[in-house]
Image (spheres, rainbow, N blue to C red):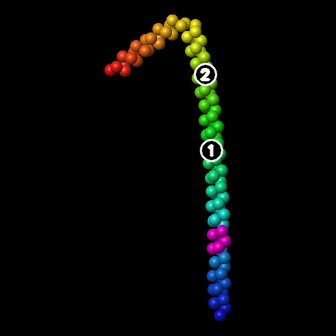
């Protein structure tokens, strides 16, 4: 009868170990999910920051270029008109074909 008791104790110990293992795996998966979520949020924040910085740089350079173009047109209005006339003629010829 001692072997039956020992087998029952072994089975109970194995069941307890399996329950503990199941709990540990569940906890590990929860931590992995939280870590992955935090990593993804951090990466998204970095991408957003980089995109905003790039947008500000492009906007600033575009504004500067528009200002320079405006100054050039003001300084040489006849040349600007001639260039626009030429571009209009060429694009008109290309669009009629």
Q: Position of residue 6 (x, y in %)?
A: 66, 87
Which residue is located at x 58 percent, y 9 percent?
74
Q: Specify the quadrant of the image occupied by residue 1.
A: bottom right
Give whichever of 60, 2 is nearer the camera.
60
Against 84, residue 95 (above or below) is: below
* Magenta stretch: dominant secondary structure: helix
Q: Position of residue 11 (x, y in %)?
A: 63, 82
Give whichever of 51, 80 is nearer the camera.
80
Instruction: Determine which residue is flagged by label 1.
Output: 43
- Disc marking residue 97: none
Which residue is located at x 65 percent, y 81 percent?
12
Which residue is located at x 65 percent, y 60 percent?
30
Q: Which residues are magenta?
A: 18-23
The C terminus lies in which quarter of the figure? top left
Q: Residues within 10 Å of mark 1 (few under 14, many from 20)?
A: few
Q: Residues within 10 Å of mark 2 (few under 14, many from 20)?
A: few
Q: Position of residue 41 (x, y in %)?
A: 64, 47
- Labels 2 and 1: the sequence-earlier one: 1
Which residue is located at x 53 percent, y 7 percent?
77
Instruction: Determine which residue is flagged by label 2.
Output: 63
Q: Callout 1: helix, strand or loop?
A: helix
Query: Is residue 22 a member of the stretch shown in magenta?
Result: yes
Q: Is residue 84 left or right of residue 11?
A: left
Q: Specify the quadrant of the image occupied by residue 5.
A: bottom right
């Amino acid at each position: 009868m001692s072997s039956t008791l020992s087998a029952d104790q072994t089975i109970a110990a194995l069941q307890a170990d399996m329950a503990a293992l199941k709990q540990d795996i569940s906890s590990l998966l929860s931590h992995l999910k939280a870590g992955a979520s935090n990593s993804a949020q951090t990466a998204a924040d970095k991408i957003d920051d980089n995109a905003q910085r790039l947008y500000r740089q492009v906007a600033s350079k575009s504004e500067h270029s528009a200002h320079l173009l405006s100054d050039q047109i003001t300084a040489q209005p006849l040349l600007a008109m001639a260039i626009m006339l030429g571009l209009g003629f060429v694009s008109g010829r290309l669009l009629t074909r």
